[in-house]
């Protein structure tokens, strides 16, 4: 897994970036730009493109790679594993994150997805039917236990640095918030045990809507409550401190809710997800940094004028990693050309706090 010595040595070997490019993560450091692996068809050709892009970034100064077992039907995890093994980076220098929650297919979409889930997961006892939401999502402890083992195999790793419970708000379609919190606490307890066993270093929650919507929204989950459930899980597992370390949520020029929506109760009143996470000592990894390519072609002039970078994509990346409390902004990277462009965004300084705040002044 990533270590203090390994990540700091990697940083020292890549010292040609702007001052705040590497940021604290645990007792080590993480690059503030990371590789995302969500998009793309489940084909061998796309695997090859991802392999080249991931290997390029990991060899060039980016030491964070993010994936999920369901991305491209397990292909993304598998290509991350190959690229990590072949890139010019030591294992203890790389921060590898993956997620579990959506029931994954295996390599391709089956002709009858429902029959596949029934046969492979329900009939085998890996998933209890009552825990399965929408025929595709489960966060029960036994299921994520199985998924973590599969992810370790796909990635060809002995340990994962950051394991996320993936989009738990999906469960709200059929369960109450209290039921979802209870399920998270039970799963967190199992992840605490897996951390004690050395299979993961940290865990967290990766979301799309949960932490950036108002408290009365149907997909809202309280970040303070999630943190409390993680603390309770650590106590139940016999740990003096929790391994709950990070959250992931979307953040970009057009999706700035994590900074602007104050929906989480802090010591002095409601706070945004970013501010609450910062004060709670959580790392924040942002997704959708260039909004699946949209921000490479479109950005408000008033915002773009404040950002540094040769290309619009670079300026979008630098906006995302300018937000307070952000450890790393993830960028989907499917070609070597885009990989080099994304890496080079880190050679420019992000916005300072005052300049970032000014973007939201009216």
Image (cartoon, rainbow, N blue to C red):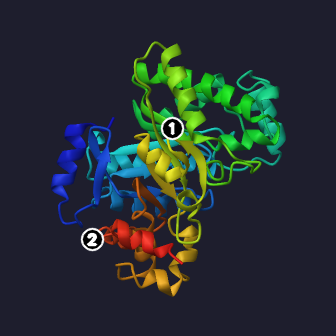
Q: Residue at x 36, y 48 (%)?
A: 84
- Of labels 1 and 2, earlier in sequence is 1
Relative to 190, say whether 324 is above or below. Answer: below
Q: Residue at x 57, y 27 (%)?
A: 229
Relative to 140, say whether 18 is above or below. Answer: below
**SS under mark 1:** strand
Name the spot of residue 278 as percent of width and height, x first: 42, 47
Name the spot of residue 232 as percent of width and height, x first: 54, 21
Tag 2 residue:
347
Dot 2 alpha-carbon crowd within 10 angstroms: few under 14, some 14 to 19, many 20 or more: some
Q: How many marks?
A: 2
Residue 350 located left or right of residue 171:
left
Can residue 66 be seen in the rendering of this structure?
no
User: Marks 1 and 2, Cα distance to the nearest angstrom?
Assistant: 29 Å
Can residue 166 be seen in the rendering of this structure?
yes
Choose top left, top right, bottom left or bottom right for residue 121.
Answer: top right
- Residue 337 got which mark? none
Name the spot of residue 134 as percent of width and height, x first: 81, 42
Name the spot of residue 338 as percent of width and height, x first: 42, 72
Dot 1 alpha-carbon crowd within 10 angstroms: few under 14, some 14 to 19, many 20 or more: many
- Closer to the camera in the image, 153 or 323: 323
For the C terminus, which image quadrant? bottom right
Q: Residue at x 55, y 62 (%)?
A: 288
**SS under mark 2:** loop
Q: Residue at x 38, y 78 (%)?
A: 307
Tag 1 residue:
204
- Closer to the camera in the image, 218 or 271: 271
Tell me whether circle 1 and circle 2 mark residues in contact (CB < 8 Å): no
Relative to 157, say whether 248 is above or below. Answer: below
Choose top left, top right, bottom left or bottom right for residue 97.
Answer: top left
For the N terminus, which image quadrant? top left
């Amino acid at each position: 897994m990533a270590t203090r010595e390994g990540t700091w040595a990697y940083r020292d070997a890549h010292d040609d970036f702007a001052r705040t490019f590497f940021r604290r993560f645990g007792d080590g450091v993480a690059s503030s730009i990371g590789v995302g692996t969500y998009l793309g068809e489940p084909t061998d050709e796309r695997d090859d493109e991802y392999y080249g892009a991931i290997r390029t970034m990991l060899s060039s100064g980016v030491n964070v790679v993010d994936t999920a077992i369901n991305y491209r039907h397990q292909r993304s995890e598998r290509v991350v594993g190959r690229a990590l093994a072949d890139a010019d980076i030591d294992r203890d220098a790389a921060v590898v994150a993956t997620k579990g929650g959506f029931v994954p297919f295996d390599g391709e979409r089956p002709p009858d997805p429902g029959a596949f889930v029934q046969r492979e997961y329900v009939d085998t006892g890996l998933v209890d039917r009552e825990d399965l939401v929408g025929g595709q999502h489960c966060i029960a402890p036994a299921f994520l236990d199985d998924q973590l083992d599969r992810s370790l195999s796909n990635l060809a790793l002995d340990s994962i640095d950051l394991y996320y419970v993936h989009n738990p708000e999906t469960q709200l379609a059929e369960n109450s918030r209290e039921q979802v919190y209870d399920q998270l606490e039970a799963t967190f307890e199992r992840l605490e045990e897996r951390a004690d066993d050395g299979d993961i270093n940290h865990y967290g929650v990766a979301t799309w809507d949960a932490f950036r919507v108002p408290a009365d929204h149907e997909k809202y989950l309280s970040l303070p409550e999630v943190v409390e459930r993680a603390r309770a899980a650590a106590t139940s597992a016999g740990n003096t401190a929790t391994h709950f370390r990070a959250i992931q949520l979307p953040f970009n020029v057009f999706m700035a809710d994590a900074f602007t929506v104050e929906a989480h109760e802090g010591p002095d009143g409601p706070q945004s997800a970013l501010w609450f996470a910062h004060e709670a000592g959580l790392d924040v990894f942002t997704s959708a940094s260039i909004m699946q390519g949209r921000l490479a072609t479109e950005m408000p002039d008033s915002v773009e004028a404040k950002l540094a970078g040769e290309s619009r994509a670079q300026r979008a990346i630098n906006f995302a990693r300018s937000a307070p409390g952000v450890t790393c902004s993830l960028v989907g990277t499917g070609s070597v050309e885009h990989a080099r462009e994304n890496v080079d965004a880190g050679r420019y300084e992000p916005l300072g706090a005052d300049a970032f705040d000014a973007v939201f002044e009216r």
